[in-house]
Image (spheres, rainbow, N blue to C red):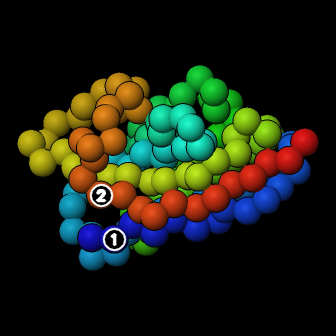
Amino acid sequence: VQLVESGGASVQAGGSLRLSCAASDFRFDNYAIAWFRQVPGKEREGISVIRVPDGDAAYADSVKGRFTISSDRAKNTVFLQMNSLKPEDTGDYYCACLLFLGGGRPTLQPILSRHTAEFDFWGQGTQVTVSS
């Protein structure tokens, strides 16, 4: 399994970007994809997560109302639409996959606080720079 992020760029404050997380060799049916943001010197921050089978999503307070996560199951791709970008959104953005091998529908919000080691697959990241 490979996750590949794309869409990172440099933009002005107030602008928009759309990040993509494409999964290859992916054969799972019950899982979540989360987006994380990392700034040098700080811990990786979970900002949004989507449970792919049903599209339920959760967001960190810092991005709620500005970012929207969505998925295209046919393409095994998850998107993060980022609007009204702020300089504090600058960072490296990673997507990560959490498999629900035991089935069920775990609550999404707590997933954003899980340790990074709990996720099954990670992408290599894409850089976002927002200038004021």
Q: Position of residue 99 (x, y in %)?
A: 22, 49
Which residue shows up at 54% across the image and 28% down it? Answer: 60
Please say if 111 is above or below 70. above
Say which residue appears at 86% left-offset and 47% top-offset.
Answer: 131
Quick check: 37 above or below 42? below
Question: What residue sits 48% from the left and 35% below the top?
Answer: 43
Circle 2 residue: 121
For the residues bearing labels 1 and 2, Cβ distance under 8 angstroms: yes
Q: CA distance from mark 1 to mark 2?
A: 7 Å
The label number, if any, that marks residue 50 in the structure image: none
Q: Is residue 87 left or right of residue 101?
A: right
Q: Please state which of residues 35 and 28 is positioned toward the viewer in this rendering.
A: 35
Kindly state the secondary structure of the residue where label 2 is placed.
strand
Q: Where in the figure is residue 37, as x and y percent of width and height?
A: 55, 43
* Residue 24 in sight: yes
Q: Residues within 10 Å of mark 1 (few under 14, many from 20)?
A: some
Quarter of the picture containing the C terminus is: top right
Up-down relation of residue 52 to residue 47 (above or below): below
Q: Is residue 132 left or right of residue 33?
A: right
Q: Which residue is mark 1?
A: 2
Confirm whether residue 54 shows in the render: no
Specify which label sits upstream in the sequence, 1 or 2: 1
Residue type at tag 1: Gln
Q: Is residue 5 left or right of residue 51?
A: right
Q: Locate residue 10 relative to residue 121 in the image: left or right.
A: right
Q: Position of residue 106 (x, y in %)?
A: 25, 31
Residue at (13%, 42%) from the top-left corner? 103
